[in-house]
Amino acid sequence: MIKELMTDYGYIKTTTELKDLKENQKPAIIKEVDIARSHGDLKENAEYHAAKEKQAFIVSKISELSDLISRAEVIDPSSLEHLVVSFGSTVKVVDLDTDREITYTLVGSIESDADNNLISYNSPLAKSLLGKKVGDEIEFIIGNNEKYFEILEVSFKKISFED
């Protein structure tokens, strides 16, 4: 079984969403399906078909989140040393072609947020960074473009998750 690394925040977020799906959304959609079914001919009942689609989505999401939680390994990034890039590290890199500095934090896939430079530790960029230290250069291919970064800083900074 492949473990899914996440912070306590990611675990709480995932279990809270799963609980809502099971306790609120699933019972509500079952009622919607029953109400729509009572409106007659199911072949031409758009409300019924929409409710069934929503029900299938909810059941699928419950299955997906249950699987994720069963594989979860909650890690406190502050307990790691961060001498090299690891889960929870904040990494400042410089694009060697443009001299643009960018800072990323490696988090669990459920916690990733590109707009806030929180990248999944499973992403291609994060995989290129893992295990590297200050001064190391990495090659990263995005689309058809090769990017070259140098690692300027590896540290732990309290991760700020925005909802």
Image: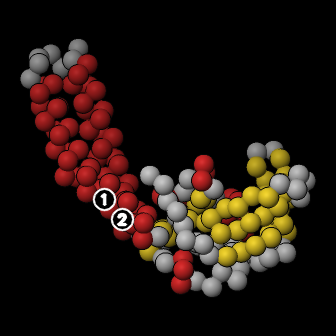
Residue at (32% x, 54% y) in the render: 17
Q: Which residue is mark 1?
A: 16
Graded by Cα atoms within 10 Å as few (under 14), some (14 to 19) or many (20 or more), the crowding at tag 1 reads few
Relative to residue 20, is residue 115 drawn left or right? right
Position of 39 relative to 9 (above/below):
above
Image position of 138 with respect to 37: above or below: below
Quadrant in which residue 88 is drawn? bottom right
Tell me residue 111's x, y (percent).
50, 59
In the picture, which quadrant includes the N terminus?
bottom left
Residue 12's disc is 2
Instruction: Determine the residue positioned at 68% across, 58% down.
Output: 124
Kind of element beneath mark 1: helix
Residue at image coords 30%, 39%: 56
How far from the left and from the top, in percent, is residue 133? 77, 78
Residue 77 appearing in the image: yes
Q: Position of residue 47 (x, y in %)?
A: 23, 22
Q: Total number of numbered labels?
A: 2
- Amino acid type of the residue tagged 2 in the rendering: Ile
